[in-house]
Amino acid sequence: MAGRILIVGVGNAGLKIADGLARSGKVDELILADIAPEGGPDIAGMLDSCYDCEVKFSELDGLQQNRVEKLLRKDKPDVVVQSASLTSPWAMHGRTDKIATALSQAGLAVQLPAQLPILTTVMKAIREVDFTGPVANLSFPDVNNALLDRFGLAPTIGLGNVSISHLRVRAAERKKRSLEGKSPDSFPLIRLIGHHNQVYNVMEARPPENPGESVRVYLGEEGRRADELAYRGYPTTPGIDFNIITAAAALPAILALLPGAEPLRFSVPAPGGLPGGYPVVISDGSVELDLPDNVDLEEAVDFQRQFARHDGVEEVTGDGTVVFTEKAKQAVKSIDPRLCEPLIFGKWLPRWLLLMSYMNWKA
């Protein structure tokens, strides 16, 4: 297994993913693409010096479709990783002022105008150049991939989120087996159904008060439920350091998408444009659902939509308009009600500018 991977967006999370891919020994070449050239060539050169993997940097404005197309045609990657956004989802972390509190209470959906523009441009470029390889998206895939699926623009899979919960369950099972005197290297099959919004409780080792809102954990081919395993890890306070486990959770899926990779059974966000995260089999660059026999897909999708509401998304209409929840609207009402007006497909940049005008102002 070997191949060429293009990473669009090498901020904090993208750089950690790049480091993991370069050190894996399973990648021939990494192309790091970002709008900011400051430090980019130096970072690529450093990674190139550290591992047996060629790493180079390309300056790229991800909002310019023709430039994305040119890069795809020139470098011909086997896999594309989309990690770029206009604003980091952690941009407000640590702030306790009125604006930061309101945006936090509204849910991550209020930041969709920052997450969608580059992702959409990249996917349009991919369709235009007829790129047939897999695309893995890190930018709020539980919602964005499903939204773009309405227009034939869904990435192959998402990254992070339920994959993070998968790693936490695996660690808990490993420790449990060790305490029971069993081999910690012998694992049952692990499959999860879970949403981005549930990751915070998982990382804080804080089960929800309603057991029905737990991440759904299935062990073995028979799918024995063991939801409690998702909440047994070391309690970690939310913050940008989450990107450490985000990158670790992204690596197995990305590497499994490479040509000639061994098949992987794992849990990933938004396979095939579905909302939320599900168990899958990744093989030969393709992805298939791997649900336990006792799981109904339609019911699982309804479960995911419930948690999208916790993120502030009431629904995504057939024409791609995002309708926000009443809770999200009330959260930003005293700041600017326009922040949670229906978000029309493609009309994101004006909303992002409005959002940034408040994110840059403390009150």
Image (cartoon, rainbow, N blue to C red):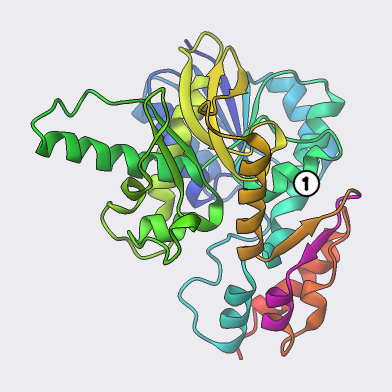
Q: Residues within 10 Å of mark 1 (few under 14, many from 20)?
A: many
132 and 278: which is toward the camera: 278
Residue 220 lies, with reference to residue 205, above or below; the image says above
Kind of residue indicated by mark 1: Leu
Residue at the left extreme of this rendering: 181
225 and 276: which is toward the camera: 225
Residue 116 lies, with reference to residue 207, above or below; the image says above
- 362 in the magenta segment: no
Residue 308 x %, y %: 65, 57
On the picture, is 357 further left or further right than 92?
right
When asked about the image quadrant of residue 48, the answer is top left
226 and 171: which is toward the camera: 226
When asked about the image quadrant of residue 341, the answer is bottom right
On the picture, is 354 further left or further right than 35?
right
Report the label total.
1
Q: Residue at x 54, y 28 (%)?
A: 291
The residue that label 1 is drawn on is 147
On the picture, is 208 further left or further right than 76?
left
Residue 110 x %, y %: 70, 67
In magenta, the rendered stretch is: 319-331
Give SS at disc 1.
helix
Residue at the right extreme of this rendering: 319
On the picture, is 243 further left or further right than 345?
left
The answer to whether residue 222 is seen in the rendering is yes
Residue 332 x %, y %: 70, 81
| Image quadrant occupied by the C terminus | bottom right
When asked about the image quadrant of residue 24, the answer is top left
82 and 173: which is toward the camera: 173
- 330 in the magenta segment: yes
Residue at the front extreme of this rendering: 294
Q: Residue at x 48, y 14 (%)?
A: 263
